[in-house]
Amino acid sequence: MKYKLFTAAFVLACLLPSAGMLFVPPTQAAANERLSPAPVLRLESGAWNPAVFDETTAYVADHFALRQQLVTINAALRTGLLASSPAEDVIYGRDGWLYYAKTLDDYQNRATLSQDEARQLAQTVRAMQDYCQARGARFVFTIAPNKNSLYPEKMPARYLRADSPGNYALLRPFLQEFGVNYADLFTYLSGWDETLYYKTDSHWTNRGAALAHDLLMDTLGLPHTVSGQADYTVERAHRGDLYEMLYPKGAAYEEQQVYAHRFAHVREPRSAEDILIETMCVDAPNGRLLFCRDSFGNALYPFLADSFSAATVTRAMPYPLADVQPGDTVIVEIVERNLPNLLKYPPNLGNE
């Protein structure tokens, strides 16, 4: 009898996650996670979808009931007992530090750009600069360092680093050779005796963003309030993107610095991830800004918005440089791991 009960309990446990999909709300993606879409029986052409069974398997694997709770429990056991991450995109480092796995090529100095591609990338940035300056605008380019580029000491020792140049090391001399107006955040941020990135997030803190703002404005030679000297309060309110990917139902938060800002949104964004955000600041010391950015701009754009009377903050690629007008300021920010995207999505500069 006990074997029948054990078998019934085992079968029930196996069926519960998939059968529960009929009653439990659909699983939502955590942080940067991408879940498989629902399968379709027919293609747009009307033909039967030959991959429907594979798509169904992938969909159930990503959406089974209580998935996030079970993923969180599994991750807690793996990190607690084995100090390793079960999440493909998350590296579990020393002292609970989390790193984004897609930065490994950069960390290990495995260049994904060739020498010629690095030169072409720098030429592309110089072409953007020439285009903006020809329209009477100021221009500055900056690269947000990967977290493990500034704080490698918490990375697991098993990830060995090659004695060869990575993408950034290949690109940097060409930026100088072609005269790109470049704000060097690698040198600037590494010079501060404080941690400027979150422990469980892939991005810089608000304090790191404040200092990045100051360097950009200094490089441009524009008047601004020194954000790095501004007062702030501290709240335990930041949920790290890597933490959420690893522990989707976890409840831990990190401390973050909270600054007062003067700007207002033209239209309230749904989130800092919006493709387009527009701001205005009536007492700002500078005119219009076009800020082309990625997710590192989420924390950075509020500081810049305080420095410009009007700001267009965009995640669009290719960059919308055709909107530049005389007197504008153009800032292009891209994270180190995404540098090849500048070749993948080059801006349309027309014939100018």
Image (cartoon, rainbow, N blue to C red):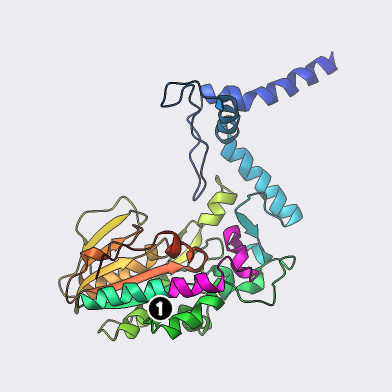
Residue 313: x and y in percent read: 29, 63
In the image, residue 265 above or below residue 18: below
User: Depth check: 166 or 113 in front?
Assistant: 113
Q: Quadrant of residue 51?
A: top right
Secondary structure of residue under mark 1 = helix
* Name of the residue lying farthest toward the front: 351
Q: Which region shows up in magenta? A: 97-122
User: Depth check: 266 or 169 in front?
Assistant: 169
Type of residue at label 1?
Leu
Instruction: Please tell me how many numbered marks the rendered image carries.
Output: 1
The N terminus appears in which quarter of the rendering?
top right
Q: Is residue 116 magenta?
A: yes
Residue 312: x and y in percent read: 25, 63
- According to the picture, the residue beneath numbered tag 1 turns out to be 211
Residue 253: x and y in percent read: 51, 57
Residue 77: x and y in percent read: 71, 48
Residue at (51, 62) in percent of width and height: 254
